[in-house]
Image: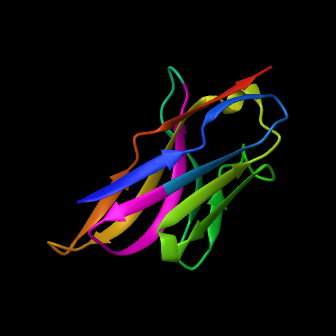
Amino acid sequence: QVQLVESGGGLVQAGGSLRLSCAASGSIFSINAMGWYRQAQGKQRELVATITRGGSTNYADSVKGRFTISRDNAKNTVYLQMNSLKPEDTAVYYCNAEVIATLPLNALNAWGQGTLVTVSS
């Protein structure tokens, strides 16, 4: 079994910064891509950023230049540094990971429970 636990959400004023973390634990053999998604109230979940095991990144146009995704493979952890936050960034942010799990050996698409980011104007 694999668990993803996010932390770092909270309330911040527009223009401020937050750093989200997501740690994966459990019966993990390896983790391929990791990413962050968000869901604002009344809207569909959308991609924010992804990062491959090798460090290649992809960002939604709305966050390019403001957000930076990174990961620590040794710690099975992914981060999202969010700068110049805007009220429209307010959402629940979810961590996602493509996990190769052991016991039994299988591929999983794991999700965290979400962490709320609120940006006030």
Name which residue lies at 57% across and 53% down.
21
Image quadrant where residue 9 sits: top right
Whether 66 is among the magenta residues is no
- 114 relative to 72 in the view: left or right: left
Coordinates of residue 104 in the picture (x, y in percent): 14, 72
Position of residue 66 in the picture relative to residue 50 (left or right): right
Q: How is this picture coloured?
A: rainbow
Residue 102 position (above or below residue 116): below
Region rendered in magenta: 23-40
Picture residue at 74% right of the left edge, 26% below the top: 87
Q: In the displayed structure, does residue 21 sit left or right of residue 67?
A: left
Q: Position of residue 43 (x, y in %)?
A: 51, 26
Q: Which x, y percent locates residue 3?
A: 33, 54
Query: Which secondary structure type mostly characterizes the magenta part of the structure?
Result: strand
* The image quarter in which residue 68 lies: bottom right
Tell how many labels: 0
Percent x, y of residue 56 = 62, 73
Q: Residue at x 43, y 49 (%)?
A: 5
Quarter placement of the C terminus: top right
Instruction: Check the image and name the residue furthest to the left.
Output: 104
- Magenta run includes residue 27: yes
Q: Quadrant of residue 29?
A: bottom left
Q: Residue at x 22, y 60 (%)?
A: 1
Is residue 68 shown left or right of residue 15? Answer: left
